[in-house]
Image (cartoon, helix red, strand yellow):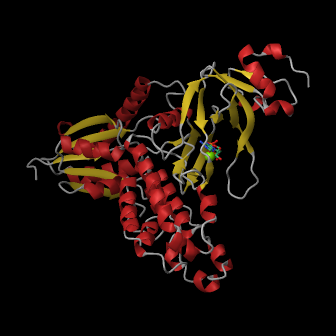
């Protein structure tokens, strides 16, 4: 295991994700050695997006703006819990020709992160089969790293 | 009906005069180079695209199961006026609808571009329909399809064997070997980043001449970025279910079946039903105890009770291949 623990947390605009973040803020605030990277990943635009006159650069701009909002919300939560700015970084990625979970795994391995954190929204098995579940995909692949799957409070 | 023949290019007049539709049309055939308003293009009209003249001789029909069929005005049957060849033409029809599964909604839509890309990829592949895509005068992407001379897979299977048991011993292996070529075809699409989009038992045609299975209808598309191919996989499970059962069984069908009835019905639990729609029975072993476990286990991956899902067509294909290899 890496000496300086590097933690990668996947964030989006959902309450599930912010909940996972608050959890990390709680447990990680005391861990001074741990650096935290906030990762936002966005998928390819829907296939009819270009047909309707959309451009890739406009799409990316919109996604960048969205990521900025998510990052600033996340930073506030972490700062309030006493996580210093120097320990934080952000990364916004386009999952081009890949699924979100594939991109997440790629970023994990590129950056050699020892721990990955995701929220879990709790879907039915039917939904999981048809639409996939990032937390499950991650759990399946976490062989040489650790995954925290943070369930929501209501369960 | 008085026809003004001067309205048509000289080259097509002799064949047009002779064409059988001229005997039954009620209006002067019009020539369309812009097919945007497809509902106004009717029987006897001529679509002029790709330097050719296609006269409309009929329309395909909604292939829905049981329900009275309606014509599809965007899918006319045509003859090339010069060569006499028959084709099916698909005109651009931008239709979208919402599919609700559990709490999630998926937007499905028709994509002529996607169908065109599939047609290009499978141009030399015998397990798909073939065709070419051309732009009309208004830049609509029109697909000119070779007709697969044959019938729908479900119609074909329904006629094989007098009983399920006879079908199993006499025909099942051949059906599965053929189906494996269809599965390999879908894998090819996925390997190339494309999906079929509407895998159903009436979208495989059994070619009359050599009984090969051929996929048709590639225009449906939807947006599920995390599991883009799961819908296709689910469709393959449904087709396999039909092939193994020779029909689909809902609980009501079991009750009515002379060899099954209440007794078998009482053994069915929720876990035996389709994971997605919870209507049809996927645990066929309960209906036909002689079905090999290796095949039934593949079906169970698509049932409510499954512990594991297939993540790719390759996984499904491998297990099916193994099961088929061990059949007598
Ligand atoms: N290449 C082909 N060879 C023979 N018949 C075909 C072919 N393509 C289509 N058909 C027939 O025409 C019907 C309609 O075509 P197709 O399914 O491609 O249209 P669609 O509008 O996409 O239909 P759907 O409502 O199923 O989405 C088919 O169900 C089939 O009966
Ligand atoms: Mg169809």
The residue positioned 35% from the left and 35% from the top of the image is: A96
Give the image quarter of residue A85: top left
Residue at 44% across / 48% down in the picture? Answer: B185
The residue drawn where x is 20% and y is 45% is: A109
Relative to A64, does residue A26 appear above or below in the rendering?
below
- Residues A27 and A66: in front is A66
**Above or below — where is B221 with respect to B256?**
above
Point out the residue furthest to the bottom here: B263
Q: How many numbered marks does the figure carry? A: 0
Between B267 and B226, the one nearer to me in the picture: B267
Query: Which residue is drawn at the image coordinates 31% and 45% (left, top)?
Result: A102
Relative placement, left or right, of B24 versus B36 is right
Give the percent coordinates (x, y) of residue A128: 43, 57
- Give coordinates of residue B111: x percent, y percent: 55, 35
Q: Looking at the picture, how far across and down is residue B291, in whole percent? A: 48, 76
The answer to whether residue B29 is visible is yes
- Nearest the camera: B202 or B80? B80
Q: Quick one: A150 or B187, which is closer to the camera?
A: B187
**In this rendering, would B247 be left or right of B290?**
right
Q: Is residue A75 left or right of residue B256?
A: left
Vertical arrangement, residue B128 with respect to residue A56, above or below: below
The furthest residue to the right:
B1
Quick one: quadrant of the C terminus of chain A? bottom left
Query: Is residue A82 visible to the viewer in this orientation of the structure?
Result: no
- The x and y percentages for residue A141 are 26, 55
């Amino acid at each position: 295991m890496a000496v300086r623990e590097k933690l990668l947390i996947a964030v989006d605009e959902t309450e599930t994700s912010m909940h996972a973040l608050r959890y990390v803020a709680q447990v990680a605030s005391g861990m001074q050695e741990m650096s935290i990277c906030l990762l936002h990943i966005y998928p390819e635009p829907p296939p009819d997006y270009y047909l309707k006159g959309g451009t890739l650069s406009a799409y990316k701009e919109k996604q960048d703006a969205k990521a900025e909002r998510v990052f600033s919300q996340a930073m506030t939560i972490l700062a309030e819990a006493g996580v210093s700015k120097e320990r934080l970084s952000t990364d916004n990625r386009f999952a081009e020709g890949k699924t979100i979970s594939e991109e997440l795994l790629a970023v994990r391995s590129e950056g050699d992160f020892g721990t990955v954190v995701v929220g879990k929204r709790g879907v039915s098995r039917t939904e999981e089969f048809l639409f996939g579940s990032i937390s499950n995909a991650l759990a399946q692949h976490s062989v040489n790293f650790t995954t925290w799957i943070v369930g929501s409070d209501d369960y | 009906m008085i026809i003004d023949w001067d309205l048509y290019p000289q080259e097509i007049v002799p064949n047009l005069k002779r064409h059988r539709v001229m005997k039954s049309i009620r209006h002067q055939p019009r020539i369309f180079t812009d097919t945007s308003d497809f509902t106004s293009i009717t029987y006897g009209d001529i679509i002029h695209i790709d330097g050719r003249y296609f006269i409309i001789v009929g329309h395909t029909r909604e292939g829905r199961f049981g329900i009275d069929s309606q014509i599809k005005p965007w899918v006319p049957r045509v003859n090339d006026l010069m060569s006499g060849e028959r084709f099916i033409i698909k005109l651009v029809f931008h239709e979208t609808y919402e599919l609700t599964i559990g709490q999630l909604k998926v937007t499905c839509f028709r994509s002529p571009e996607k169908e065109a890309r599939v047609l290009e990829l499978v141009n030399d592949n015998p397990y798909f329909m073939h065709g070419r895509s051309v732009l009309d005068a208004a830049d609509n992407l029109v697909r000119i399809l070779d007709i697969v001379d044959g019938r729908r897979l479900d119609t074909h299977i329904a006629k094989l064997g007098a009983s399920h048991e006879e079908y199993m011993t006499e025909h099942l292996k051949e059906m599965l070997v053929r189906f494996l070529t269809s599965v390999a075809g879908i894998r090819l699409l996925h390997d190339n980043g494309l999906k079929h989009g509407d895998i159903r038992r009436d979208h495989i045609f059994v070619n009359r001449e050599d009984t090969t299975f051929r996929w048709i209808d590639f225009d449906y598309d939807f947006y599920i970025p995390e599991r883009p191919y799961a819908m296709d996989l689910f469709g393959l499970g449904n087709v396999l279910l039909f092939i193994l059962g020779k029909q689909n069984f809902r609980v009501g069908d079991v009750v009515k079946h002379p060899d099954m009835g209440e007794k078998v019905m009482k053994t069915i639990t929720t876990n035996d039903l389709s994971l997605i729609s919870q209507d049809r029975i996927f645990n066929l072993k309960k209906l036909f105890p002689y079905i090999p476990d290796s095949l039934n286990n593949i079906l169970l991956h698509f049932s409510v009770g499954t512990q594991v899902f297939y993540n790719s067509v390759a996984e499904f294909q491998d297990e099916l291949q193994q099961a088929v290899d061990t059949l007598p």
